[in-house]
């Protein structure tokens, strides 16, 4: 499987996309998540403060569950390109 996505590939994604990224991910820099967000037309980025490579487990799980549920149940509309931090 080729994981070398190019902006033109990302721009073809039609589904609303919720991107979750850990602020302290040692494997994938935040800039990559921002590029993905900027090139997927209907996407939103949630950056988890102090999160690592798999930031949705442990203390952040309940907030992840809540945020992802809100994203999935929201009415489909043009999602503003946004980044939000876990507070």
Image (cartoon, rainbow, N blue to C red):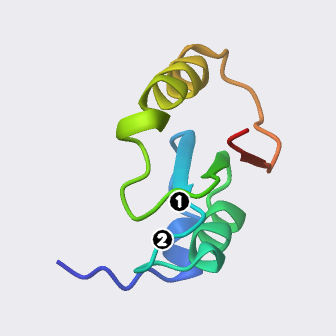
Residue 46 placement (x, y as % from top left): 64, 47
Measuring 66% from the left and 22% from the top, which residue is drawn there? 76
Q: Residue at x 44, y 79 (%)?
A: 26
Which is nearer the eye, 4 or 86? 86
At label 1, counting other C-alpha atoms closer than 10 Å, the crowd grade (few under 14, some 14-19, many 20 or more) is: many
The reply, left or right, for residue 66 in relation to residue 79 is left
For residue 60, which numbered disc appears in the image? none
Residue at horizontal 77 percent and vertical 35 percent from the top: 78
Residue 25 tag number:
2
Q: Which residue is mark 1?
A: 22
The one of 28 and 58 positioned closer to us in this rendering: 58
Q: Are marks 1 and 2 in contact (CB under 8 Å)?
A: yes
Numbered disc 1: secondary structure: strand
Q: Disc 2 on helix, strand or loop? A: loop
Tell me if 46 is positioned left or right of 14 in this view.
right
Q: Is residue 38 above or below residue 70?
A: below
Residue 74 in the image, given as x and y percentages of width and height: 64, 16
Q: Is residue 85 above or below residue 35?
A: above
For this rendering, which residue is in front, 8 or 38? Answer: 38
CA gap, disc 1 and disc 2: 5 Å
Residue at the far left in the pictured view: 1
Residue 86: quarter of image: top right
The 10 Å Cα crowd at callout 2, few under 14, some 14 to 19, many 20 or more, is some
Relative to 59, 70 lies left or right? right
**Total number of numbered labels?**
2
Quadrant of the frame with the C terminus: top right
Q: Position of residue 18 (x, y in %)?
A: 55, 42
Residue 66 position within the rendered picture, expressed as x and y whole percent measured from the top left: 54, 19
Q: Residue at x 73, y 47 (%)?
A: 85
């Amino acid at each position: 499987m080729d994981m070398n996505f190019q902006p033109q590939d990302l721009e073809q994604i039609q589904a609303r996309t919720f991107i979750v990224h850990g602020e302290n991910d040692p494997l994938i820099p935040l800039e990559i998540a921002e590029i993905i967000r900027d090139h997927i037309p209907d996407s939103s980025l949630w950056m988890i403060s102090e999160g690592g490579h798999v930031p949705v487990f442990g203390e952040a799980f309940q907030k992840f569950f809540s945020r992802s549920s809100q994203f999935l149940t929201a009415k489909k509309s043009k999602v503003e390109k946004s980044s939000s931090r876990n507070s």
